[in-house]
Amino acid sequence: EDIKVAIVATGGLSHQVHGERAGFNNPEWDQTFLDLFETDPDRLAAMTHAQYARLGGFEGSEVIMWLIMRGALAPKVKRLHRTYYLPSMTAIATAIYEDDLAEPETAPIFVDKQTEGLADLEGTYPFTLDRANKAYALNRFLRSLVDPKVRARFAAEPEAAMVDAGLSEHERRMVAARDWRALIQYGAIFFVLEKLAAVSGVPNIAVYAAMRGQSVEDFQKTRSAAMTYGVGR
């Protein structure tokens, strides 16, 4: 079954806040950028940072981050909404797009070119759309551990807390075992995985070592300083 993806994009477009060019804006380029973002993202992806800076100001070159959002959409999109205004130093746009699945295309999304060969890189697990979808409930639960109430429930009733969060039996087993390597391979995002480590009283260094199949002592021997840290108190 086809799944429609909707993106709400909002952020700064042309602006420069330093040097003699401070206060620079280019509304004409901003409109061109929004048009190309919708209809020809390949052209935007081929531009250099210097070209973005010349057209939209040095700080305005941050619009390249919009291409990450565009990569999550189909090659053809429908624009549902678009506004643009220039209130102060930074031009601001808000837009809503959704996949146009009326005429499915077989061509890969343009960002696919950037990840060619990553699957063959040993010990590396790119966070693809497929992995994001598969591990969504798991990552949502791990992120929720920043909430003291969720942490308390997880400490008191770990299995029930995970069931209520919609985790599968396989996901619950990995979390219960604190199988860091398996969790990463499955699709857990490290920056939420370390929330589980903090709740478990496990420093980050122990997670790194476990993912490499080493003891903390052996892992520290590969560093220039034997230190440890974590995100817990």
Image: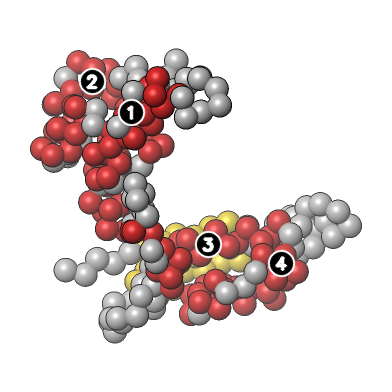
Q: Name the residue under label 3.
A: 66
Instruction: Tell me which amino acid carries mark 2.
Output: Arg
Do the numbered discs 3 and 2 sit on residues whose CB atoms are within 8 Å?
no
For the point 85% across and 60% down, which residue is it?
Answer: 21
The amino acid at mark 4 is: Ala
Taking the image as shown, residue 220 lies to the left or right of residue 159, namely right
- Residue 60 figure quarter: bottom right
Residue 66 position in % (x across, y down): 53, 62
Residue 199, image x, y percentages: 33, 21
Q: Do the residues labelled 2 and 4 touch (CB within 8 Å)?
A: no
Q: Residue at x 18, y 27 (%)?
A: 176
Q: How crowded is mark 4: few (under 14 residues within 10 Å), some or many (20 or more)?
A: few
First of labels 3, 2 by sequence position: 3
Residue at numbered disc 2 = 153
**Between marks 1 and 4, how big is the CA–CA gap?**
44 Å
Residue labelled with disc 1: 214
Mark 3 or mark 4, which is nearer the start of the sequence? 4
User: Residue 59 vs residue 129: left or right?
Assistant: right
Above or below, 119 relative to 179: below
Label 2: few (<14), some or many (≥20) within 10 Å? some
Query: Circle 3 — which element?
Result: helix
Looking at the rendered structure, the kind of residue marked 3 is Trp
Check the image and report above or below for 182 versus 42. Answer: above
> Residue at (75%, 69%) from the top-left corner?
54
